[in-house]
Image: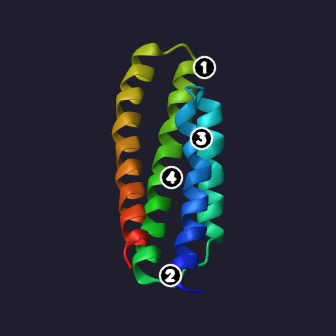
Amino acid sequence: MNRASECKAFITITDKSAGAANTTELSVILRYINDLKQDLMTLKVEDIQLKSLQERYLKFAEELGEKLTRAKRDQDQGDYAAFQAASANLISIGNNGIDLEQELQQYCRKP
């Protein structure tokens, strides 16, 4: 595969997971993140830069998945102080995802 087709496959995966931004329901967001992890694990890329991005995206998805699971547990148990603390942390992690997406888009737009 060439870089353009690898970029297209990668962006298709990340675009699919962007639907998580349209909901505040933690279980739905968690489903999107788990799908993202699965798709990234099966994505085959040879381009060194894309491989690095893939590894960082996987790390991001794993971290976000863990934090979402913890936040959902806190919410389900009615521990709203812990839930609020987790929410602030989730926003920070989410910003990392935005940075990764911007890096992917910029790299894939290069000639």
Mark 1–mark 4 Cα distance, whole angstroms, equals 22 Å
**What numbered label is drawn on residue 19?**
3
In this view, the residue in front, 108 or 49, is 108
Q: Earlier in the sequence, mark 2 or mark 1?
A: 2
- Nearer-N-terminus badge (3/1): 3
Amino acid type assigned to the residue bearing label 3 in the image: Gly
**Is 105 placed above or below 67 here?**
below
Query: What residue sits right under mark 2 in the picture?
Result: 3
Above/below status of 17 relative to 108: above
Q: Residues within 10 Å of mark 3 (few under 14, many from 20)?
A: few
Q: Amino acid at mark 1?
A: Asp
Q: How is the image coloured?
A: rainbow
**Pointer 1: what residue?**
76
Q: Amino acid at mark 2?
A: Arg
Report if the CB atoms under discs 4 and 3 are less than 8 Å apart.
no
Picture coordinates of residue 6 (x, y %)? 56, 76
Query: 77 or 46: which is nearer to us?
Result: 46
Res 59 label: none
| Marked residue nearer the N-terminal end (4 or 3) | 3
SS of the residue under disc 4: helix
Q: Which residue is mark 4?
A: 61
